[in-house]
Amino acid sequence: MNTHAKTYPLVLSALFLALCLVLPIVTGGIPAIGNMLLPMHIPVLFCGLLCGWQYGLVIGFAAPLLRSALFGMPPLYPVALAMSFELAAYGLIIGAVYALLRKGGLAALYTSLLTAMVGGRLVWGLAEVVLLGLAGKGFTLQAFLSGALLTAVPGIVLQLVLIPAVMTGLDRTGVVRFRHAAG
């Protein structure tokens, strides 16, 4: 493996981690908007797609914890801890599924993205159940649906539009190839 192949995903991962730290500042003035747009999710999803599941997993897990330690937001318990597992799942799932289906073009991209979005939200729900259970509190189905779906609809739509658009642009410029049929 040449030096470029080793450093390229590492440098991109650092960029995505930096974006995870900075993007919430853009929406941080109005927390409700940040909760709706899910600004930390997008860089993690790109990291999994462009760098692979290993990098997506690590950046996804580290970003909320690092952001909590540096800026105090999100609060460490239970929010940043649950988000760490959620974002790690996003990075892992999108990277692994995309690697398996990569030559499937845009359909593979959407399959990877949707699988990661569902899987990450399920992991978040499970993490909330465990973390809140340890504190003697409950996590209801209503709280799950509200946090995973209802308040997140704008962010979900943004991810479904932005990520394929950027990946298509990267493909057209030759930076990343994904539209080629298997063969």
Image (cartoon, rainbow, N blue to C red):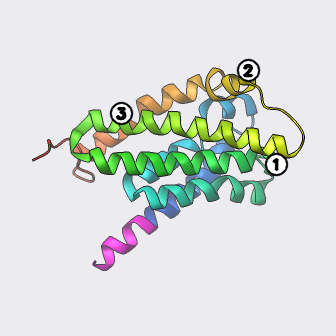
- Whichever of labels 3 and 2 marks the residue nearer the N terminus, that label is 3
Q: Callout 1, which amino acid? A: Tyr
Report crowding for label 3: few under 14, some 14 to 19, many 20 or more residues within 10 A (C-alpha). some
- Whichever of labels 1 and 3 marks the residue nearer the N terminus, that label is 1
How far separated are the C-alphas under marks 3 and 2? Answer: 27 Å
Q: How far across and down, in percent of the image, does residue 75 sit? A: 81, 47
Between label 2 and label 1, give the one nearer the viewer: 2
Residue 159 among magenta residues: no
How far separated are the C-alphas under marks 2 and 1? Answer: 20 Å
How far separated are the C-alphas under marks 1 and 3? Answer: 32 Å
Task: Tell me the element at label 2.
Answer: helix
- Asked if 164 appears above or below 74 in the picture, the reply is above
Q: Magenta residues? A: 1-10
Q: Are marks 1 and 3 in contact (CB under 8 Å)?
A: no
Image position of 69 (left or right of 121): right
Q: Name the residue beneath numbered marker 3.
A: 110
Magenta stretch prevailing secondary structure: helix
Front in this rendered view, residue 34 or 41: 41
Q: Residue at x 52, y 38 (%)?
A: 119
The image's mark for residue 142 is 2
The image's mark for residue 77 is 1
Front in this rendered view, residue 134 or 25: 134
Whether residue 167 appears in this view of the structure is: yes
- Whichever of labels 2 and 1 marks the residue nearer the N terminus, that label is 1
The image's mark for residue 53 is none
